[in-house]
Image: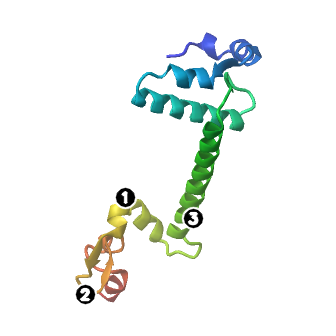
Amino acid sequence: EKSAVDRSSEAVASQLMRPAVEVDAMAALQDAETQPELKLVQQKLVRLQRHAAKHELRSKALTHTPQFIKEEAREQEAWIAQRKTDKKKAAAAEAPAGSTPGADEVSRIAGSSLEQDFQVECAGCGAMHAWAHLQLGDGRCETCCKQV
């Protein structure tokens, strides 16, 4: 729990005015005694490198950073950007501009990707549909519900 003193403008300004703590990447890698510990140190250094490139004002600065740490940070940044793009495309594909009024409710009820991929036979016409589309009609597709 943070107190109001920690969040005051003076405390924030004081934190921003402090020089960045220098972390010697090579020394941190050499200090690792076991393989799992080395893996964790590498992950931490890559995360610090990625954030150092992203944020101007930072509390930690890496020094003596090996090239492979910098490359891994760039690869992670590219992967994160790709994932964000994929999620935006998936969200746009799930809610097209000219969708029917009930489509938002279908998306909300469907929730997980498992339910969206689950194929079920319509009780009315026998056609295969995603469960998300049959769930609102109690096992019947929208076409069969309109015919009743």
Whole-number angstrom distance, CA of label 3 to CA of label 1? 17 Å
What percent of the width, then of the height, locates residue 71? 64, 44
Asked if 143 appears above or below 35 in the picture, the reply is below
| Near-viewer residue (130 or 147) | 130
Residue placed under numbered mark 1 in the picture: 112
Dot 3 lies on which element? Answer: helix
- Name the side, left or right, on which 100 lies relative to 19: left
Q: Amino acid at mark 1?
A: Ser
| Near-viewer residue (43 or 88) | 43
Asked if 17 appears above or below 127 in the picture, the reply is above
Q: Amino acid at mark 3?
A: Lys
What percent of the width, then of the height, locates residue 65? 66, 30
Whole-number angstrom distance, CA of label 1 to CA of label 2? 24 Å
The residue drawn where x is 59% and y is 20% is: 27
| Scheme of image coloration | rainbow
Quadrant in the rendering for residue 142: bottom left
- Crowd band around label 2 with a 10 angstrom C-alpha radius: few (<14), some (14–19), many (20+): few
What percent of the width, then of the height, locates residue 73? 62, 41
Who comes first in sequence, dot 3 or dot 2? Answer: 3
Dot 2 lies on which element? Answer: loop
Q: Nearer the viewer, mark 1 or mark 2?
A: 1
Q: Which mark is residue 126?
A: 2
Residue placed under numbered mark 3 in the picture: 89
